[in-house]
Amino acid sequence: MSKYLVTGGAGFIGSHLAHALIAQGHQVVVADSLVTGRRENVPAAAEFRELDLSHIEAARKAVDGCDYVLHQAAIPSVPRSVRDPLTSHLANVDATLNVLIAARDAGCKRLVYAGSSSAYGDTPTLPKHEGMPGNPRSPYALQKYTGEQYCQMFTRLYGFETVTTRYFNVFGPRQLATSPYSGVISLFIKAALANTSPTIHGDGRQTRDFTYIDNVVDGVLRAVTAPAAGEVINVASGGRISLLEMWEALRRQTGATAEPTFGPAREGDVQDSQADITKAARLLGYQPVVEFSEGLRRTLEWTR
Ligand code: UD1
């Protein structure tokens, strides 16, 4: 049994990790500012520390006594970062450096960092593999990319073990459709269940490697102990579907009849995104455990 810090453990991905660790018998500390996270997502068995990690003292309090750090805290959303780059910079870059320093100084064994597929940007090559150079197109993408570069530098320079798991459009239960910045699947599920029109930014032919949450939990927990220090590893499903196809799948599963409304494409948006997951298979023994339509079915069930 080990003691884990999950930063952002009151948020969507972090709370799933916290619950999975507790189910495996580990001790869990959740650090979260509750800016985007929700207190009720934190498992009852976890110790909760309400902290703003953009201050170094807070980061030191967060890591205190922990063996491993799953650094999931972030302010997501490409358009939010385009509108307000400073707030997301503090949460995504300053806080990451603080958590790295604090975890290194506290003698933690390893930090697993939540990277983002947005680091690849809009390069035409598909699928995206980790050997490709970063090409961030938005403040959010640049911030998440900077975070992973810091992680790699901490491994090279200080010998502090880090692994970056690059996520690709994660969806599942507890992802809320409460703001226009919410993940597209949560917004489209809300529309499908109300039989109202979802808004498509652009022509809807953009594609994403939508990844069900259980796959991410499996990949991250593997990254804690795998021989992968200093590595950046895609954790995704390895497929891709367009927004139009995703809406059709939702219509089939819900019986919704509404047609989408089309609006202008978003600034900083990427056209196509699909992960090469051979590195995850090789280094982590990772294979997706829940495929897209089953993930969609489970998410619909939870939302209902
Ligand atoms: C990006 C990252 C992802 C990261 C996420 C964090 C890429 C390829 N992916 O996701 O790894 O976790 O940021 O926020 O960069 N859309 C609509 N209608 C809506 C909402 C969204 O058409 O109501 C469109 C967007 O314009 C976009 C797609 O749906 O083309 C996906 O949007 P979203 O769910 O916000 O995620 P990304 O920006 O792709």
Image (cartoon, rainbow, N blue to C red):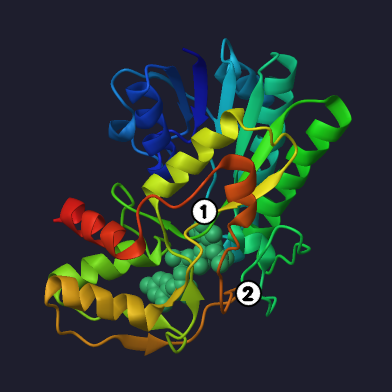
**Image position of 136 (left or right of 300):** right
Which corner quadrant of the image does residue 28 belong to? top left
For the question of whether residue 115 can be seen, the reply is no
Instruction: Report if the beta carbon of the residue with label 1 is closer than 8 angstroms to ligand 1.
Output: yes
Total marks shown come to 2
Q: Position of residue 270 (x, y in %)?
A: 59, 75
State the separation of the CA atoms marked 2 and 1: 24 Å
Which corner quadrant of the image does residue 162 belong to? top right
Which residue shows up at 19% across the image and 55% down it? 303
Q: Which residue is mark 1?
A: 76
Q: Position of residue 44 (x, y in %)?
A: 28, 21
Q: Which residue is mark 2?
A: 126
Q: Is residue 87 above or below residue 138?
A: above
Q: For mark 2, does the 10 Å Cα neighbourhood hold few (<14), some (14 to 19), or many (20 or more) residues?
A: few
Tag 2, which secondary structure? loop
What amino acid type is highlighted by mark number 2? Answer: Leu
What amino acid type is highlighted by mark number 1? Answer: Pro
Which residue shows up at 31% across the image and 53% down it? 176
Q: Is residue 222 above or below residue 277?
A: above
Which residue shows up at 14% across the image and 84% down it? 257
Q: Position of residue 88 (x, y in %)?
A: 60, 50
Query: Residue 95 versus residue 214: which sits nearer the camera?
Result: 214
Which residue shows up at 61% across the image and 39% down it? 113
